[in-house]
Amino acid sequence: MICGRHYNDIDHITPVVYKWSRSGYRCTVILIGFADVSNDYRIQFLSMLACVRVIDIRVLLTGTDYIQFRLINLVLYGHSSQYLNRQCYQLLEILWPVGRRRQFWNKVAEKLLKTAFAHNSEGVVVFDWISQKSVLPLEFVRHVLAIYRARGDVSISLPHGDSPHFNELIRNHDFRIEPQIKYAHSDMFDYIVCPNELCAKRYRPFINGTKIKVLGSARYSDEWLGILSKLLPLPAIRMNFRCFGRKYAVSL
C-alpha cells in the first residue's frame, strides 16, 4: 500500500509503482491529497497498470469521517508549522483529545488495511518522507505504522525529492550544518530510501545506518525518463495578445 499526498509524491512514486507492478506484485495507491490529483496524467497511467489499484480516500471514508480527517489534519499541521495560535490547538484538544483521535486513527487504518491487503496477508506500507511540517500529521502516520507493524507488515519511506546536486551550499536548508531534529522521527519506519548520499546524510545522525538505503533516483533513471517521455501530455497552446500597447504571451 502506497499513500500519496501531492504532486511531489507522484513524481517519485509513479516509477516505483510501475516497476513493482511489472514484477507481478499487487499494489494499492491511496490518494490522500486534493481531489484534482486523481486527474494527473501519471495517476491515470498507474490506473491502467495490471495489479495496481488507485483509490481516493474520499471513496473509503464517509463524508463525516472525511471532514473530521481533514479538520484534525489541518489543526495538527497548523500547530506544528506555527500557523495556528495556541487557542485553536487547545480547542482541538477539547473536541478531539488524544484518546478520541487514536480511536479515529484506528478506524481509518482499518479502512486502509481492508482495502489494500487480502485477509491475513502481510505486505508493505509506504509513505513519502513525512516531516513534522507535513500536511499529513506524524501522529496519524506513526499510529498507522504501529498497527501494521503489529501484524507483520514492513514500512518504507520513499523520496519526495532528490537533491540531485553536488554543491553543499544548495543543499536542504542552506548553511545549516548541524543535524536537523525534524528528521529524527523517521526512525518510525523500517527503512528510509534515499536517491543519494546528500539526502541520506540528513537521517544518519538519528537512524541506524542499516535502515537507510541509498538506491539512486527512480524518477531520473534512464528507463523511467524514456517511459515518461511517452506519457507527457501535449504542450500548452501559447497565444499572444496586446494590452495597453504591450504584448503578452499566455498558455492555455
Image (spheres, rainbow, N blue to C red):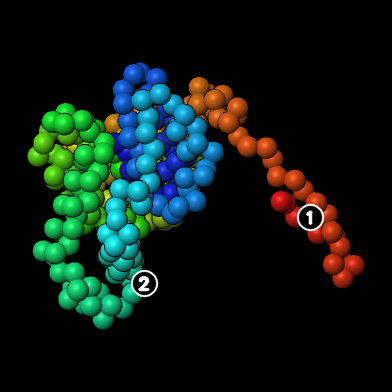
* Amino acid type indicated by mark 2: Tyr
* Residue 211, visible in the rendered structure: no
Question: Which quadrant of the figure has residue 153?
Answer: top left
Residue 168 image offset from top left, x and y in percent? 44, 45
> In the image, what residue occupies the spot 14% across and 64% down?
100
Q: Is mark 2 on a helix, strand or loop?
A: loop
> In the image, what residue occupies the spot 22% across and 51% down?
108
Q: Earlier in the sequence, mark 1 or mark 2?
A: 2
Q: Say if 205 sits above or below 241 in the image.
A: above
Question: Which quadrant of the figure has residue 98?
Answer: bottom left
Look at the numbered discs 1 and 2 and tell me whether their residues touch, using CB distance below 8 Å. no
Of residues 129 and 104, which is closer to you in this image? Answer: 104
Looking at this view, name the residue that lies furthest to the right. Answer: 245
- Mark 1 Cα shell of 10 Å, populated few (<14), some (14-19), many (≥20): few
> In the image, what residue occupies the spot 50% across and 22% down?
223
Q: Mark 2 points at which residue?
A: 83
Of residues 136 and 39, which is closer to you in this image? Answer: 39
> In the image, what residue occupies the spot 69% across and 40% down?
235
Q: What element carries label 1?
A: strand
Identify the disc placed on residue 31: none
Residue 189 image offset from top left, x and y in percent? 21, 41
Of residues 248 and 97, which is closer to you in this image? Answer: 97
- Mark 2 Cα shell of 10 Å, populated few (<14), some (14-19), many (≥20): few
Of residues 112 and 23, which is closer to you in this image? Answer: 112
Identify the disc placed on residue 249: 1
Looking at this view, name the residue that lies furthest to the top. Answer: 23
Residue 62 image offset from top left, x and y in percent? 29, 56
* Residue 56, visible in the rendered structure: yes
* Amino acid type indicated by mark 1: Ala
Compared across the picture, whether 231 is left or right of 3 comes to right
